[in-house]
Amino acid sequence: MTPVSAAGLDPAEALALLAWQIEAGADEALESAPIDRFAAIAETASVRRAPPAAEPAAPALLTASALPPPLMTPVSSPPAINGDGNAYRAAQGARSLEELRAALESFDGCPLKATATNLVFADGNPAARVMLVGEAPGGDEDRIGRPFVGVSGQLLDRMLAAVGLDRTQVYITNVIFWRPPGNRTPTPAEVAACLPFVERHIELVGPEVLILAGNAAAKTLLLRNEGITRIHGKWFEYQSAGMSRPVPTLPIYHPAYLLRAPAQKRDAWRDLLQIRERLDHRA
């Protein structure tokens, strides 16, 4: 079909011509001359590679008088003691063990409190020469509200008795004051939430000898990366900011671990003898 040009036609004629072509079976519009699509692609690519136009000149700098006033950052009010988990302020405000316990009972910064039955604060004699810090309460401890009262606590009593000690001569607590669900290992965040209370606990008791039972207690309070199998039976010194003097500190195996690994009881016995020797030397 010979192409028909619409040049010079009025709109009505052009529309009539288009309708006639559609009726004749024309289904697409064709140019009178072929189009080189490869050349069009090359032209587009050359435009893309062309250097950008020169940037407009930068506006003149504003003078100091023309600058807007700086935005003032509002000063936030001091955080609430319990509202955001500010454990340090809550712990340092305690001047006695009774006040420390009350602070923990009202403290909401550790999520374990929501799932536990009881706060497990301490047991034994606050005036004792020896303070023992374990890991976290178990099911029996959570139900009764005292540390080391389950099977591992019974073994601890026998261990202490072997070197002439009992709960009237030892003060016992943990680095975690609420039972983790399922007796799982406490998370670093949970340990961090309780740590200021543990430090204040030791400061208020002021023991002559500090025993750290288990991996969690040793790593938390001694700030060491080694596991309990490498540092048990070695003497360290523990001192927090609120203590006037360091306290001799001995990491030992946790009784729960000894129940699972009875072959380690020989080493545990040697560690206990060191405690007895230290107490006799300081008597």
Image: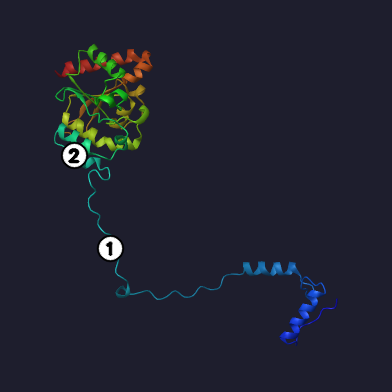
Task: Name which quarter of the figure residue 49 lies in.
Answer: bottom right
Image coordinates for residue 134, horizontal then vertical, percent? 28, 25
Q: Residue 244: where, in percent of width, then height?
A: 16, 33
Q: Amino acid at mark 2?
A: Gln
Establish if 57 lies above or below 111. Answer: below
- Occupied quadrant, residue 73: bottom left
Q: What is the count of numbered marks?
A: 2
* Residue at x 27% of width, y 35% of height: 194
- Image quadrant occupied by the N terminus: bottom right
Q: Residue at x 34, y 24 (%)?
A: 228
Please, what secondary structure does the residue beneath circle 2 have?
A: helix
Q: Is residue 185 visible?
A: no
Quarter of the picture containing the C terminus is top left
How far across and down, in percent of the image, does residue 17 sit?
A: 78, 81
**Left or right for 114, reference 16:** left
Label 2 – label 1 distance at C-alpha:
33 Å
Q: Which type of secondary structure does the marked residue at label 1 adopt?
A: loop
Q: Residue at x 31, y 35 (%)?
A: 112
Q: Nearer the viewer, residue 19 or 274?
A: 19
Circle 2 crowding by C-alpha within 10 Å: few under 14, some 14–19, many from 20: some
Residue 96 found in image quarter: top left
**Color encoding of the figure:** rainbow
The disc at residue 72 is 1
Image spot of residue 249 (x, y percent)? 24, 25
Specify the label residue 27 is tagged with. Answer: none
- Left-right relation of 137 to 13: left
Kind of residue sitting beneath label 1: Met
Residue under pointer 2: 92
Residue sitting nearer the eye, 90 or 40: 90
Number of residues whose C-alpha sits closer than 10 Å to that of mark 1, classed few (under 14), some (14–19) or many (20 or more): few
